[in-house]
Amino acid sequence: MALIVQKYGGTSVGSTERILAIAERIVRCRNEGNQVIVVVSAMGGETNRLAGLGNEISANPAAREMDVLLASGEQVSVALLSMALADLGCPGRSFLANQIRIFTDGNHQRARIQNIETEALDAAVAEGVVPVIAGFQGTDSTGSLTTLGRGGSDTTAVAIAVAMKADECQICTDVDGVYSADPRIVEDAKRLSSVTFEEMLELASLGSKILHPRSVEFAGKYNVALRVLSSFEDGPGTLITTETPTMEQPIVSGIAYARDEAKITMSGVPDIPGVASKILGPVGRTATEVDMIVQNTGADGLTDFTFTVKRQDFESTLKLLEPVRQSLGARELSGDNKIAKVSVVGVGMRSHAGVATRLFDALADENINIQMISTSEIRISVVVAERYLELAVRAIHDEFDLASSGTQPDT
Amino acid sequence: MALIVQKYGGTSVGSTERILAIAERIVRCRNEGNQVIVVVSAMGGETNRLAGLGNEISANPAAREMDVLLASGEQVSVALLSMALADLGCPGRSFLANQIRIFTDGNHQRARIQNIETEALDAAVAEGVVPVIAGFQGTDSTGSLTTLGRGGSDTTAVAIAVAMKADECQICTDVDGVYSADPRIVEDAKRLSSVTFEEMLELASLGSKILHPRSVEFAGKYNVALRVLSSFEDGPGTLITTETPTMEQPIVSGIAYARDEAKITMSGVPDIPGVASKILGPVGRTATEVDMIVQNTGADGLTDFTFTVKRQDFESTLKLLEPVRQSLGARELSGDNKIAKVSVVGVGMRSHAGVATRLFDALADENINIQMISTSEIRISVVVAERYLELAVRAIHDEFDLASSGTQPDT
């Protein structure tokens, strides 16, 4: 008998009809002889609605209370799903963070899980009960509610799987797996039967919204078998695994992109130690996420410093850096908020040279200018003008023949 | 420094604008030198919306999960009000039932409060914090959430006032006090500066929706000074007090009515012991509330048995009793769902004879037929055809001169 943790996101529990369908799916999994523990998010749109109420009250809502507010969203969905299970004769029982208990640090809105008590869950599972756990929320040492921030429910699911020594953690979502590229852009994109944690981490970080990098990292660290699959259709989905030596990896597994990007360049900066931190320090102290950072070797004691941020942070970051430019005596501060990032990911890159060349050639063949390049061991990312995004993704997908060889056949 | 518990109902926190206004009112009360503890309901309409979701999932939703679902409504309003207080520089802090903790029995949807721990509240008040407590909810001995049923938040407020030995429990609502009659029906109805617990209990039981009888009973039992006042306007409201010997009571304090009533009569019932329980027993085992019960002295060994129920329960009760009629061999089962109940209430009735006569005369003068009569020591209720309701209320209000003498001047 396998112990399976299933996580359902906001879209999967977005209406009472969907909740009823999910309940049937859980019962089916249980009838196949599995023990099931469920983690759910708030109903789709609910977290935004609640946050909107908070923002109507205050431009800067008290962090502790924002968590009390937001946590109510998951409370609603665990109650509804547990009712639906009970109606199907399946003993579902809702658990809130303080009932399990899921202890976190006290950093409201971005709390980290520290410890999960398993007594209540162990007892429930032994009784044959299906625990339905509110994702995203925790409780700190003072008994205050906390929330885990973005990707919180995925993280809860993985943490529960770790604590309960589950055989598999299934992230049930509105897509049926991880694809070689976004199927809305590349018609013949293929579902991958498996990817490695490292690849998934790169794909997630690069804008593939299926899984939050934090939960992938967590699952990789504790080696939890993680599977992405559809909430609504049957199918094996994509298994996220540790890399095994015998596994024949394709050179490139998938292509990811991020559309809402902007780049900011400070030109003619004195090329002396400490400049990078003088520029990025003030940005880092805001909530702005800095993604790619590129600094070229300078000439004449001057250099150009470029980095990318989310498009929404473009104006505020420019404004923030103008006084920095003046104090550094840099020549110019400029930017472009119509860019996109395209990345190829694959652990096969480690052992295959020439991936970068093929990528650059493919883009050159389409007359797409590359504005920035950044690489990791298993990833190459390029920044291009946003209007070339779809073209670039398709060109790369063709170049690496992902429609056929990019996928592993299901076994 | 007085310790005041203020309870705000759903209408008072029905929008973020109203919550901001309530926050200012709380700060004002605090700035006047009081220590304030706040109890709030869910935002107006929210409990119904949540219950509606539950009913979409199941015709008979699991009771434990319905409480988890409903309790989320109060969680939202305590969070929003605490944020609003913080924005005004007032240290508000939300408390859910399991954070205080408010222990109840395990009867979901109609739990009774058993014990309130005051440590967390004592500490908060000592710190100068304004606790903002989720009304309506509790936690049972297993740690499951419970809800208190109708009038739950009023009951929470009174229980907190008792546990914290508060000087006054203020029920802040959308009316500015208790009136001699419904001002929508009687133009010159007067606000009462005080009523006794017994009078308030009768008024509440009889359809005056300002306070739930359960909370009045609770406050009376523990002798908590209870005040009904407006959430939106300044004013002394109505104080609900124990009767003092020196207090000159008017004969009649107020007139209450209940519109959505229906009566059911079983005629020609054998007049033998045990008949009443044979008829009311099956009704009592459903959720139907039986209100007035009248049985006349019979003739020829037969009697007529009449009682009233809420109009919504009329059809189902008739259906339920048809087999009972047959098994008793009673002649006929009939009913009328177009009736209303009008009641006069006043502790002064105890020492003044003739109230009933004046009441009956006043109705006779208007040609209003009285269908049923029921009395208590401080109340007389009559059932009349619903179309005469307003006329009856105005006639009685005039008869007892409540527009002038019915009110106590504010002191």
Image: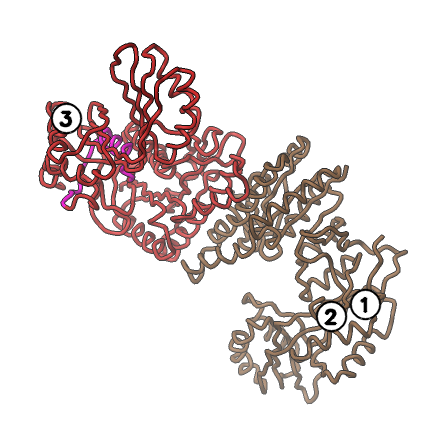
Chain colours: A red, B brown
Q: Is residue B96 visible?
A: yes
- Please indicate whether residue B130 sits to the left or right of residue B366 in the image: left
Q: Secondary structure at mark 1?
A: loop
According to the picture, the residue beneath numbered tag 1 turns out to be B403
Amino acid on which disc 2 is placed: Val
Q: Is residue A196 above or below residue B26?
A: above
Report the mark closest to the observer, 3 or 2.
Answer: 3
Dot 3: within a 10 Å radius of its alpha carbon, few (fewer than 14), some, or many (20 or more) residues? some
Report, in whole angstroms, how far the alpha carbon at label 3 lies from the one at label 1. Answer: 91 Å
Q: Are marks 1 and 2 in contact (CB under 8 Å)?
A: yes
Residue A357: percent from the left, percent from the top? 12, 26
Label at residue B186: 2
Task: Tell me whether circle 3 and circle 2 mark residues in contact (CB < 8 Å).
Answer: no
Work out whether mark 1 precedes mark 2 in sequence or the reverse, and give the earlier one. Answer: 2
Let me know if marks 3 and 2 both belong to one chain. no
**Label 2: element kind:** loop
Few, some or many residues within 10 Å of mark 1 (<14, 14–19, 20+): some
Q: Residues within 10 Å of mark 2 (few under 14, many from 20)?
A: some
Q: Quadrant of the N terminus of chain B?
A: top right
On the image, the x and y values in percent for residue B363 come to: 76, 80
Looking at the picture, which amino acid does disc 1 mark?
A: Ala
Q: Are marks 1 and 2 on the same chain?
A: yes
Q: Which residues are magenta?
A: A188-209
Instruction: Tell me the CA gap for discs 1 and 2.
Output: 9 Å
Which residue corresponds to mark 3? A356
Q: Is residue A73 left or right of residue B194?
A: left
Q: Amino acid at mark 3?
A: Ala
Marks 3 and 1 on same chain: no
In the image, which is nearer the foreground, mark 3 or mark 1? 3
Residue drawn where x is 60% and y is 80% of the image: B336
A19 in the magenta segment: no
